[in-house]
Amino acid sequence: MSEGLDTRPTYRAVLAVREARRPFLGSCLARMSFAVLPLAPLLVREATGSLAVAGLASGALSATLPVFARARARLIDRKGSGLGLAWLTGLYQSGLRACLEPPPAPRRPARSAIARTDRRCARVSRERRGCKDRR
């Protein structure tokens, strides 16, 4: 067995190359967002109170990663790594912010013309029968 075959570069060897430091550290920073993905269902559940919405948000987030991989690669190829990654960072942050915002408060339904007409008819009918208004 020859001992010289195990010549894989170490992190120290990669970081010793000046041109490799910036892309390497940038990729490490970009991959940290994947460590946060398991927290998404917990945070969405806390914000919405619904485990179903949390599962839907987590599934949608996980499904978009491979679906948009080609678009991400094309953006980085066309705009360069610095500008492309800056755009992707902004899009990713806005997507997470949208998932974590609390849902809007439910609005009361507007009173329809039919409901107003029904109340008027009921009041007229009570007046004709001699009933007093309960208000």
Image (cartoon, grey):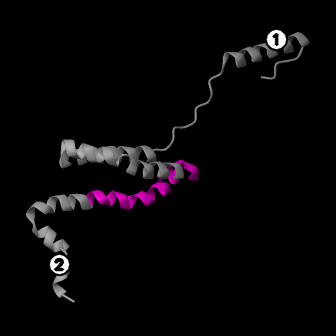
Amino acid type, mark 1: Val
Q: Position of residue 35 (x, y in %)?
A: 37, 62
Residue 134 placement, left or right of 12: right
Q: Is residue 103 above or below residue 2?
A: above
Q: Quadrant of the C terminus?
A: top right
Q: Residue furthest right?
A: 129
Q: Is residue 128 above or below residue 66?
A: above
Q: Quadrant of the N terminus?
A: bottom left
Q: Position of residue 67 (x, y in %)?
A: 39, 47
Q: Is residue 105 visible?
A: yes
Please state the extent of the stretch shown in magenta in the rendering: 29-54
Question: Which numbered disc covers residue 124?
Answer: 1
Using the rendered view, name the quadrant where residue 26 is placed: bottom left
Residue 113 placement, left or right of 65: right
Q: Work out whether residue 105 or residue 71 is closer to the camera in this orientation and state it.
A: 71
Residue where numbered disc 2 is placed:
7
Amino acid type, mark 2: Thr
Q: Position of residue 104 (x, y in %)?
A: 51, 38
Counting residues from the N terminus, which is met first, the one under dot 2 or under dot 1? Answer: 2
Residue 19 placement, left or right of 77: left
Q: Work out whether residue 4 or residue 123 is closer to the camera in this orientation and state it.
A: 4
Q: Residue at x 18, y 87 (%)?
A: 3
Count of marks, rendered view: 2
Using the rendered view, name the quadrant where residue 5 is placed: bottom left
Question: Which numbered disc covers residue 9?
Answer: none
Q: Are marks 2 and 1 in contact (CB under 8 Å)?
A: no
- Which of discs 2 and 1 lies nearer the camera? The answer is 2
Residue 29 placement, left or right of 107: left
